[in-house]
Amino acid sequence: MVKSNEITSGCQLLVIFAYFHFFGERLIKESIQLFVFTFAHINMPFDDALGVIAWQVLNRCTVLFLWLAGLLMGATTGSIVVQTGIVLATGALRIKGDKLDPVSNIRQIFSLKSLIELLKSCIKVCALCLTFFFIFSCYATNFQFLVYCGPDCALPVFDTLTRSLWAGMLLFYLVLCGADYAFQKYNALRQQKMSKEEVKQENKDNDGDPEIKKRRRDLHRELQSGSLARNVRQSTVVVRNPTHLAVCMGYDAQAMPLPRVVEKGRGGRARQMVALAERYGIPVVENIPLARALFREVSRGECIPESLFEPVAALLRVVLDIRYDDEPQGENVPRNGNSL
């Protein structure tokens, strides 16, 4: 919630300026009539004159100043509602013990927020003094001739000077309100940012305990490893590139007329496939173009396409020759029933 007190002060000044602009002449007339009425009753007894004059003051000024009070209340309430909306803060009406704590009050007085407000007030006073000094300096040449001028020419000069001062003050507050609102918005957004600990706690509340999540990942990995190990064990050769991709191919001349992709993976899964193949004694061949082509063109469980017959046949021939070397001499049937 962003709220600038300077905007409220600026709206109040604008209302006061508008009030005296529209009701200034009436206030002057009412004041003159009160002076005339007072001088007319100057010879009356004091108690009687006081009652009559007080009644005239209340009768003439109450309505005018009630209008001013109502306009100020409306401007104050409207400026706050526009900034924050309608907020029912019933908790602010409760009596809190910490508000009566002198230590807490002293800390609040000497807090960073109070220091910033003090600095803002000093800058505001200095800027207003410079503004008034500039306006007075513009009218300084006219003041020296006022002693030779009557009220008819002096009053318009003071009226123009007063309006210039009001205009300068309103212009200054317009700039101040924009700057203060931007600062309050920045400060509110900065205070709403969560710390690292709060972010961790929120993630923990939303996603659950990290230990439970880790256990779930381990169980999921174990399940995947079981099916992965079974597929790697059923393969004839593993083609890799060299650590990013791995493709397990199976070939059995009796069970499948064409080689097919049993399993494939990238990254950590590819490294796990290579490790399982080495554990089970499955040949691992590094062939970058063939590994990329198999990974890109052939899905898991599908036979190789015609475009890959030649490189796959050459690879299987080498692998089967290697496996023949492992067989006892005189045995012509390759292991697992594979054949050229």
Image: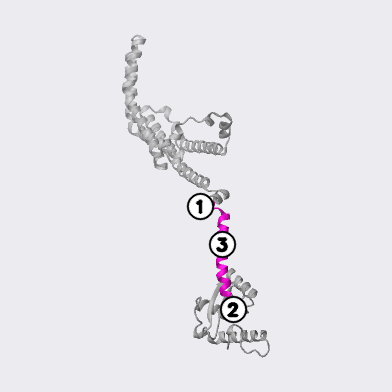
Of the residues under marks 2 and 1, which one precedes in the sequence?
1
Characterize the magenta stretch by its predominant secondary structure. helix
Q: Position of residue 235 (x, y in %)?
A: 57, 78
The amino acid on which the numbered mark 2 sits, given as a three-letter code, is Val
User: Pointer 1: what residue?
Assistant: 206
Would residue 217 be counted in the magenta stretch? yes
Q: In the shown orientation, is residue 230 left or right of residue 148?
A: right
Q: CA distance from mark 2 to mark 3?
A: 28 Å
Q: Nearer the viewer, residue 202 or 219?
A: 219
> In the rendered image of this protein, does residue 334 appear above or below residue 21?
below
The amino acid on which the numbered mark 3 sits, given as a three-letter code, is Leu
Q: Nearer the viewer, mark 3 or mark 1?
A: 3
Badge 3 element: helix
Q: Is there a contact, CB below 8 Å, between mark 2 and mark 1? A: no
Q: Position of residue 90 (x, y in %)?
A: 43, 34
Color scheme of the displayed model: one colour
Q: Is there a contact, CB below 8 Å, between mark 2 and mark 3? A: no
Q: Which residues are magenta?
A: 204-232
User: Pointer 3: what residue?
Assistant: 219
Give the residue furthest to the right.
Answer: 329
Q: Position of residue 70 (x, y in %)?
A: 35, 31
User: Which residue is located at x 34 percent, y 12 percent?
Assistant: 49
Q: In the shown orientation, is residue 61 left or right of residue 244?
A: left
